[in-house]
């Protein structure tokens, strides 16, 4: 591998780390109910937080004008120090978004001037920058859903925000792997179909995970494997027409999250045994171990009514799973040879 390629790989590794950190901080923001603490979106002028007590008071008074304070935190007698705590996580989440944008833009310009990048590679990074910008817009679109009447963000918008974050991470990691090895050599299209199916199911699982988190459905029905003492409660299909249960029924959200988890565990175990003689079996073995641990931690998280530390750990492992799936997919197509 040439020195220029080593620099590019290091740069993309930093970008992947920053995106992963952004996802984790977003999870903490959601679990601590901090997402509605900043009621304005100022992409350029909102870089600095309140810097003195007067500015903090002004920010807090502005927050008091919106539903989350008026319908929830007012009755908890929230004080300024408590407001600062929730402000911190939302502020950190927004600042990380800006930092990620700069992490893409500044090195792109530098490496392009140094002729480390060709036009095709630069276009790939430009697309990633566009995705970062879209992610910021969707993030605000999500937040404003909780600033009018109902002090809760739309779980549908939250799911869109989270899925795009995972896809951005997958895209950048794929680009990084392509720098290391871009010699196409598909040896088994059947295995490629399997990993594509696993990736698809995993994305659906992320969506229902976002639904569970966005509606706080994880703090209900905290038993396993039964829900409300039953395997298939009637309430799962209580809404008409039927499809509404999959976008508005909290019990269905939790049920689907459980069922898809079981399907993923079984599929990943099957896939591991099917690929034990392949050159990328170390990755499918890791996928097997990580998905089993993710399932166990998910059950514990449910039984403990979503303690913050367990919820964050659950999301961290989801990031690892996404990277492993992308690694396996890339290994099937391009092999494991490093330049």
Image (spheres, rainbow, N blue to C red):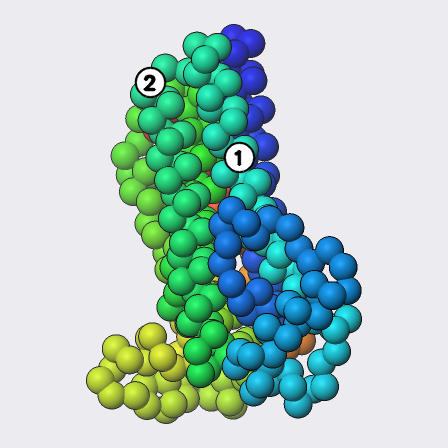
* Identity of the residue drawn at 37% across and 85% down: 236
* Separation of residues labelled 1 and 2 (CA atoms): 20 Å
- Outermost residue toward the left? 241
Q: Is residue 110 above or below residue 272?
A: above
Q: Secondary structure at mark 1?
A: helix
Q: Picture coordinates of residue 248 (x, y %)?
A: 36, 79
Q: How many labels, in total?
A: 2
Q: Picture coordinates of residue 284 (x, y %)?
A: 49, 40
Q: Is residue 116 above or below residue 207?
A: above
Q: Earlier in the sequence, mark 1 or mark 2?
A: 1
* Identity of the residue drawn at 38% across and 82% down: 249
Q: Which mark is residue 102?
A: 1
Q: Which mark is residue 119?
A: 2
* Identity of the residue drawn at 52% across and 81% down: 67
Q: Picture coordinates of residue 169 (x, y %)?
A: 47, 42
Q: Picture coordinates of residue 3 (x, y %)?
A: 56, 9
Q: Is residue 7 visible?
A: yes
Left or right, 78 with reference to 258: right
* Identity of the residue drawn at 59% across and 73% down: 62
Left or right, 202 with reference to 245: right
Q: Secondary structure at mark 2?
A: helix
């Amino acid at each position: 591998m040439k020195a220029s390629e080593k620099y590019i790989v290091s740069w993309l590794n930093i970008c992947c780390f920053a995106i992963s950190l952004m996802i984790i901080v977003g999870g903490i923001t959601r679990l601590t109910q901090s997402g509605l603490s900043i009621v304005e979106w100022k992409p350029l002028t909102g870089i600095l937080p309140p810097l003195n007590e007067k500015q903090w008071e002004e920010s807090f008074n502005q927050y008091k004008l919106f539903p989350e304070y008026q319908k929830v935190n007012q009755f908890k007698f929230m004080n300024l120090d408590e407001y600062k705590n929730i402000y911190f996580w939302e502020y950190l989440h927004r600042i990380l978004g800006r930092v990620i944008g700069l992490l893409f833009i500044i090195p792109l310009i530098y490496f392009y001037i140094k002729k480390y990048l060709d036009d095709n590679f630069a276009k790939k990074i430009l697309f990633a920058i566009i995705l970062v910008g879209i992610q910021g817009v969707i993030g605000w679109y999500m937040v404003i859903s909780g600033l009018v009447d109902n002090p809760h963000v739309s779980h549908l918008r939250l799911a869109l925000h989270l899925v795009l974050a995972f896809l951005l991470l997958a895209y950048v990691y794929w680009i990084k792997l392509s720098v290391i090895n871009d010699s196409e050599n598909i040896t088994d299209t059947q295995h490629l179909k399997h990993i594509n199916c696993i990736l698809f199911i995993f994305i659906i699982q992320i969506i229902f995970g976002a639904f569970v988190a966005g509606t706080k459905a994880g703090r209900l029905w905290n038993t396993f494997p039964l829900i409300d003492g039953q395997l298939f409660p009637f309430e799962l299909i209580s809404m008409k027409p039927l499809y509404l249960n999959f976008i508005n029924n909290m019990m269905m959200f939790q049920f689907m999250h459980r069922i898809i988890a079981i399907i993923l565990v079984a599929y990943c175990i099957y896939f591991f045994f099917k690929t034990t003689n392949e050159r990328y079996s170390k990755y499918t073995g890791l996928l097997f171990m990580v998905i089993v641990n993710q399932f166990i931690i998910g059950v514990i998280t449910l039984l403990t009514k979503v303690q913050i530390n367990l919820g964050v750990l659950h999301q961290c492992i989801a990031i690892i799973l996404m990277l492993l799936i992308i690694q396996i997919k890339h290994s099937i197509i391009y092999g494991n040879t490093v330049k």
